């Protein structure tokens, strides 16, 4: 058995998927270069108002109730990819029959998803979840399923042997599907030829009085082949529901991208967040349908007038009151600008430590990131891509120590990074150097490979005296007598001053002499007598710069 | 016949001892009858205990919900564990003391013990004072330690960053130990933290397996902290003292080594037991990482 998912009026469906609030309104889609824009597709409401494809945009604009949208190939591609994702979530054998049609082989699927009507209903629901209004049909051969999906709205299940009966009521127009032209010239030529042939056949059938598939199926085969040739016989086989062929399965590329082109540039982050939310939900639904997660989100914003000619530039990027009160950043790659002509691109990459699939979390992270790194110009196009990854699998345990929930932790880290700065939150990594401050911060990941808890050793462990650093080191005035340290005074920190009670050193070290940042220093550990008592400090003499510094205190 | 001590006597300054069986029920909600108190049936009054009408609603200690004793975890220093029983989970512990008193040593030991147990820890560092070399030397697993470095110049701003970061981390949950390092902030700045903030932190950490640790110069959390450990001024170890005072035969300077520091810890307050803590003091030694 085979199932077919067909999206009627796919350009309009792609717009509805991007803007669900338009479903209740009359919508016309136009394409072409101004001022020669023509209506390309319309929905039923617009059709009832007299808007038809081929009208000029100016004519369509006369009807004030019609909402006009430019054709977006990106949206159509996303809708097509969503259709394939939906089909592939049910069956591994999927044929990409057309931009608006996907055929699935349901052999062996009943044990997984239930009976055929249940599978058809599930497919219908899944396509609706992905924002597409589709027809679903199940039949014993692919072509019968395609015809039923084109002809009957909703869910249709044709039992084996009843194809001719069920399809007979459909008009012959279902044999000649409407093809939405793309802009590529070669494809356009072929499509034009096919369209001419189709219209010629349709005209002939109409002249013969053949209006439905039942009438076509009843025509004598030899006479039909004499008049219409092999194409006529093929159409008759289709009308009888007796055509048989094998599916040509496709491996849908794991590309999860969504885009939206804006009619008017966005200036504030709040409406941008609204659109991002929609794109993220679509991407997450597609990933979920393929049982995948994502570990990297790439946001590309196409900006307008980067040169600063636009007066709106000054106001852009100021977070609204409802936004996060504290601006936040992510530990991500720096923003990248690619200027091309009048427009430029602003790219941000949101790297995640673990595969995740939570649209709300992603939205919050993107919001925090954009708050910290505003694009700086009005946005005319939003493109969002997710790098798919296998969902993380972790075995929980009752006796395992607590660990932060990765999603919550990521959001918390992003918020803290907004408070203290991106480079000031994370885990430590020591560098292979003797230089002071020889460490760097790296991203904190809340999950590490399981390590066996250390058993308490029987022998008593001595605590290690810790140093508290002064960042930056405190400049000090040191009094020497006969080359010996006698007194240290630190003007910046009043408590760090006094007579040197005791000292050890110097410990001399140097390094990086082969680079510009060469360093050489002498270190002392000193005890100072001050008002509170005795305190231990590390005193450093910079041999290259010549200054004395109190670097830290032993605590 | 048994007796109990009611702990609500702070206002009076002395405990009230009374018979459990004779304790009156808690006051009912105000109703129409309250307008005519003489119409109510007379209550049995315990001699010497309920003469004061304000105590009519006192619930006996035996009927109070007994808070379970928190789980104690090792602080990483055996002597401190012996003194306090460890660090309590789900409670606020304060470690206070002047500079060079061993606060950071104790903090790093607790972090090392926690990461050794496989827990994730956070240090919210108001003064950006953590020394990575000391962290490694103390045995802390770096992968399990989140370091938040407050970066403003003004102490007030850093304090604000610390409190907001602490709020976020407590809300996030899942950490075994959250340390708030206020050690280098001036006490007058730290004292500006409202008590309600500490109450909020205490409530946030309650019933969680997190140990909340505050390192500061003076105790500031008041009654919100379950454990208060006060560290005294550092004492140089005996070996160093001998060398430094040996004036007649001074050893070469480079032969001296900061090998041993004596840390004095005093348990000032513990609210973990239902009895006042007896102040106790210990001294333990710490050594530098390079002392071997």
Image (tube, helix red, strand yellow):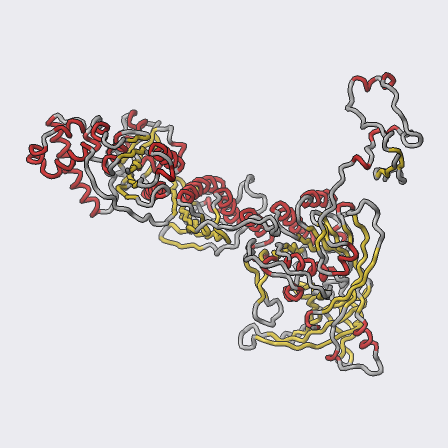
Left or right, residue A477 beside residue A543: right
Q: Residue furthest bottom?
A: B249
Q: Position of residue A190 (x, y in %)?
A: 18, 44
Identify whether B160 is placed above or below A210. Answer: below
Q: Quadrant of the N terminus of chain B?
A: top right
Identify whether A105 is placed above or below B83. Answer: above
Q: Position of residue B123 (x, y in %)?
A: 65, 55
Marker count (numbered): 0
Of residues A71 and B284, which is closer to you in this image? B284
Q: Position of residue B155 (x, y in %)?
A: 69, 54
Q: Quadrant of residue B19?
A: top right
Left or right, residue A442 beside residue B15: left
Q: Residue at the spot x=56%, y=40% of the render?
A: A321
Any part of residue A356 in sight: yes
Of residues A8 and A216, which is closer to you in this image? A216
Q: Quadrant of residue A209?
A: top left
Q: Position of residue B114 (x, y in %)?
A: 66, 56
Q: Residue at the spot x=81%, y=20% of the render?
A: B34
Q: Quadrant of residue A279?
A: top left
Any part of residue A327 in sight: no
Q: Residue at the spot x=45%, y=45% of the render?
A: A311
Q: Residue furthest right?
A: B48
Left or right, residue B289 beside residue A413: right
Q: Quadrant of the C terminus of chain B?
A: bottom right
Q: Residue at the spot x=81%, y=44% of the render?
A: B274
């Amino acid at each position: 058995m085979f199932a077919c998912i067909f999206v009627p009026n796919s350009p309009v469906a792609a717009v509805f998927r991007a803007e669900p609030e338009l479903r209740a309104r009359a919508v016309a889609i136009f394409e072409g270069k101004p001022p020669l824009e023509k209506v390309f597709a319309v929905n039923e409401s617009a059709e009832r108002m007299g808007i038809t494809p081929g009208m000029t945009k100016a004519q369509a604009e006369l009807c004030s109730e019609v909402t006009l949208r430019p054709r977006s190939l990106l949206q159509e591609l996303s809708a097509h990819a969503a259709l394939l994702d939906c089909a592939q979530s049910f069956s591994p054998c999927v044929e990409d029959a057309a931009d608006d049609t996907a055929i699935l082989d349901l052999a062996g699927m009943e044990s997984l998803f239930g009976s055929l009507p249940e599978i058809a209903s599930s497919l219908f629901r899944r396509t609706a979840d992905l924002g597409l209004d589709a027809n679903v049909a199940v039949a014993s051969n692919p072509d019968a399923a395609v015809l039923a999906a084109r002809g009957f709205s909703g869910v249709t299940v044709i039992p084996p042997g009843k194809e001719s009966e069920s399809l007979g009521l459909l008009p012959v127009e279902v044999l000649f599907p409407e093809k939405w032209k793309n802009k590529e010239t070669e494809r356009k030529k072929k499509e034009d030829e096919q369209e001419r042939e189709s219209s010629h056949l349709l005209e002939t059938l109409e002249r013969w009085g053949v209006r439905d598939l039942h009438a076509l199926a009843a025509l004598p085969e030899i006479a039909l082949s004499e008049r219409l040739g092999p194409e006529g016989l093929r159409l008759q086989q289709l009308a009888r529901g007796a055509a048989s062929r094998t599916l040509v399965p496709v491996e849908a590329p794991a590309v999860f991208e969504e885009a939206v082109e804006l009619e008017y540039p966005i200036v504030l982050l709040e409406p941008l967040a609204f659109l991002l939310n929609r794109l993220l939900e679509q991407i997450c639904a597609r990933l979920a349908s393929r049982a995948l997660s994502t570990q990297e989100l790439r946001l590309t914003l196409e900006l307008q007038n980067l040169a600063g000619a636009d007066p709106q530039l000054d106001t852009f990027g100021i977070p609204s009151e409802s936004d996060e009160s504290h601006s936040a950043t992510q530990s991500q790659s720096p923003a990248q600008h690619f200027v091309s002509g009048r427009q430029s691109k602003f790219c941000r990459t949101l790297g995640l430590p673990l595969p995740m699939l939570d649209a709300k979390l992603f939205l919050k992270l993107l919001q925090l990131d954009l708050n910290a790194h505003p694009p700086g110009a009005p946005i005319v196009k939003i493109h969002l891509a997710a790098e798919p990854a296998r969902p993380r699998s972790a075995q929980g345990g009752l006796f395992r120590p607590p660990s932060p929930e990765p999603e919550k932790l990521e959001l918390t880290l992003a918020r803290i990074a907004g408070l203290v700065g991106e480079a000031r939150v994370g885990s430590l990594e020591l560098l292979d150097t003797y230089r002071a401050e020889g460490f760097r911060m790296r991203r904190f990941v809340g999950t590490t490979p399981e390590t066996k808890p250390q058993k308490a050793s029987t022998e008593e462990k001595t605590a290690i005296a810790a140093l508290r650093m002064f960042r930056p080191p405190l400049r000090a005035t040191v009094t020497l007598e006969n080359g010996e340290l006698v007194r240290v005074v630190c003007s910046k920190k009043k408590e760090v001053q006094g007579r040197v009670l005791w000292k050890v050193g110097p410990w001399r070290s140097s390094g990086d002499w082969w680079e510009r940042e060469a360093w050489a220093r002498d270190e002392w550990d000193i005890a100072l007598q001050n008002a509170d008592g005795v305190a231990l400090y590390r005193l450093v003499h910079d041999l290259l710069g010549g200054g004395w510094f109190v670097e830290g205190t032993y605590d | 016949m048994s007796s109990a001590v009611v702990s609500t006597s702070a206002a009076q300054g002395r405990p009230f001892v009374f018979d459990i069986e004779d304790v009156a029920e808690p006051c009912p909600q105000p109703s129409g009858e309250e307008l005519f108190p003489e119409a109510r049936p007379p209550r049995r009054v315990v001699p010497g205990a309920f003469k004061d009408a304000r105590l009519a609603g006192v619930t006996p200690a035996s009927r109070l919900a007994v808070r379970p004793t928190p789980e104690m975890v090792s602080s990483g220093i055996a002597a401190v564990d012996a003194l306090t029983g460890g660090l309590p989970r789900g409670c606020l512990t304060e470690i206070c003391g002047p500079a060079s008193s061993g606060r950071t040593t104790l903090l790093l030991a607790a972090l090392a013990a926690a990461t050794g147990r496989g827990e994730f820890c956070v240090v919210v560092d108001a003064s950006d004072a953590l020394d990575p070399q000391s962290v490694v030397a103390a045995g802390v697993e770096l992968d399990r330690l989140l370091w938040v470095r407050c970066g403003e110049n003004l102490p007030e701003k850093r304090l604000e960053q610390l409190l907001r970061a602490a709020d976020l981390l407590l809300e996030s949950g899942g950490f075994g130990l959250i340390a708030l390092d206020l050690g280098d902030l001036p006490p007058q700045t730290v004292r500006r933290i409202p008590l309600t903030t500490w109450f909020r932190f205490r409530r946030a950490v309650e019933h969680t397996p997190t140990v909340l640790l505050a390192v500061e110069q003076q105790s500031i959390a008041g009654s919100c902290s379950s454990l208060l450990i006060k560290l005294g001024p550092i004492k140089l170890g005996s070996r160093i003292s001998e060398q430094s005072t040996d004036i007649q035969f001074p050893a070469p300077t480079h032969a001296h080594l900061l090998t041993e520091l004596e840390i004095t810890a005093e348990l000032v307050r513990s609210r973990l037991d239902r009895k006042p803590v007896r102040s106790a003091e210990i001294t333990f030694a710490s050594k530098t990482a390079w002392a071997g």
